[in-house]
Image (cartoon, grey):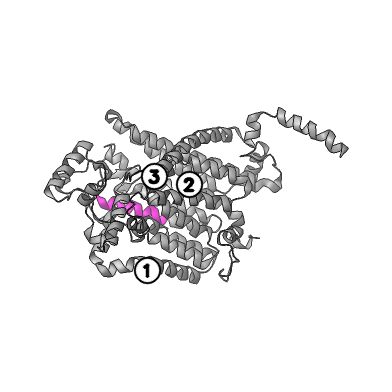
Amino acid sequence: MQLRSVFTPQAAEEQSQTPIITRWLRHFFTEDISPDNLPIVDLQRRACWIGVAFILQALNEVVYDWNPPFLKQLIAFIPFVLILGSFAATWIAFRPQTLQQRTRHLQAHPQRWQRRVLLLTVILAIIGATQLVRVTIMCFLPPQMSNDGTSLDTNAAILLVEGRNPYTDSNILDLARRFPIQPNWTTPLRRGQFADRLDYPSMTEFQTTLDTDLKAGAAPEFESKVSYPALSFLTLVPFALFNDYNVLPFYFAGYLLLIFVAWKVVRPELRPWVLLLSLANIPMWISVVGGNLDIFVTLLIVLAWLLRTRRWASALLFGLALATKQTSWFLVPFYLIMIGRNYTWKEAIGRGSIAGGVALLFNLPFMLWNFHAWMAGILAPVADPMFPMGVGLVNLNVAHVLPYFPGWVYSAMEGIAMLAMLAWYWRLSRKHPEAALLLAVIPLFLAWRSLSSYFYCAAFPIFILLAARPTIGKAASRLLQGPMHDQPARASHEHMTVR
């Protein structure tokens, strides 16, 4: 007791003399750099690279909002480079390191670049906190739908409650009369007044065309179809039943649940990073504000990958993602490779069948109701004549830096890139199963439409899976609160290391 009374004031005095910034850094960078603590040091380094990806993606949003016509060709390169840079930063986050590299990082932890990235990430987190407040307020306001995907899905839920088929009775003009949407929140088609052109319509053209269509009672220039699988609007049926058309709380809750999952599954040393990155993830906050369906799909995919040691839970969750949006379909071969390489190909076929059955279960009633209408809606993103748009290669075409290529060229480049990503994932799937979330969207960078939202929902989920991987079995048990009864018979190298 005497020793304690002597040393405690001394320790308190040393603590009070420690610079505030040093004490603050301790929350994000461990002071224990012993070899036994190497995994934590390495994960904190990876978190910094995820922060770099967020910074580049946030800069892309700034460039998108600031786009003077006289600099159109020059600025076209900026999103192209920023998104490629975010790909590179995310790839470095899960890239394996040599022992020499790890030792060098231990000698100077945190490094100067890591401190600077942390500072910039904190700045983004402050901006993200304002978005958090904004979304919270918007949840109690009348519906404000900034994209036609959300408004069409909400209208589909309303139609279904009324006993009508959403895939046959959806109409953009009814939507414009029901909800206060801006004309440029719609998806224009190269038909009618927009036929025989490739340049995206201006705001004035949007408004005049929509006004004319409202008077004529037909809108061939705008996408009217419900363009997603059935679960995209079935989740919104409760809102329609209560005549509450502000569906933003659903997508907001999806992102909060993703953060909660991350908090539960990562090690305690990584939890400050979870909170920081979840706030600093400006691109995903933009998706939340817009009611983007990708938020819900991302949650399902993260859970499917996180619970991959559980056959039924993982397959069911992946099936729900397949039943929600077509972007998840790009992950099907990656999911099968992950299961086949880590377990057996019989197991992969079994899980694929379960996931496909779940997707079919939600869509079969609408297929039987009117198969042609359902198929036309599902294929609308690739079958309907949409304008070229995005941040990928096509952005250079839109800005007339490069000439437009025939449509088959974009499809061929996308297909070749997908084969290359699958071959790469074949090598990575055992040690880095989370790499699928990045590799599956890279081919879309070469597509006719490479919207930035396709690429925004990869970095943060990859960090969650990276941080949870050392304790993946325990993480699954904590989420489902039960023992792992349904593990496949043969474990992979990854699962043999689980304690």
From the top left corner, tell me how far across and down residue 14 is, in percent.
75, 30
Seen at 31% across and 68% down, the residue is 365
**What is the quadrant of residue 381 in the picture?**
bottom left
Instruction: Please identify, in this view, whether the residue under mark 2 or under mark 1 is nearer the observer.
Output: 1
- Could you say which is closer to the camera, residue 494 or residue 160? 160
Mark before the other along the chain sequence, 1 or 3? 3
Q: Quadrant of the N terminus?
A: top right
Between the C-alphas of marks 2 and 1, the distance is 31 Å
Label 2 sits on what residue type?
Ala
Magenta residues, start to end = 405-420
**What is the quadrant of residue 236 in the picture?**
bottom left
Query: In this image, 28 relative to 54: left or right?
Result: right
Q: Are marks 2 and 1 in contact (CB under 8 Å)?
A: no
Seen at 50% across and 57% down, the residue is 303
Q: Residues within 10 Å of mark 1 (few under 14, many from 20)?
A: some
Tell me if residue 18 comes above or below residue 411 in the rendering.
above
In magenta segment, residue 255:
no
Label 3 sits on what residue type?
Phe
Seen at 34% across and 46% down, the residue is 451
Instruction: Please identify, in this view, whether the residue under mark 1 or under mark 3 is nearer the observer.
Output: 3
Q: Residues within 10 Å of mark 2 (few under 14, many from 20)?
A: many
- Could you say which is closer to the camera, residue 422 or residue 484? 484
From the top left corner, tell me how far across and down residue 58 is, in percent.
43, 37
- The disc at residue 459 is 2
Label 1 sits on what residue type?
Leu
Tell me if residue 326 comes above or below residue 20 in the rendering.
below
Between the C-alphas of marks 1 and 3, the distance is 33 Å
- The disc at residue 140 is 3
Q: Quadrant of the C terminus?
A: bottom right
Query: In this image, 95 relative to 369: left or right?
Result: right
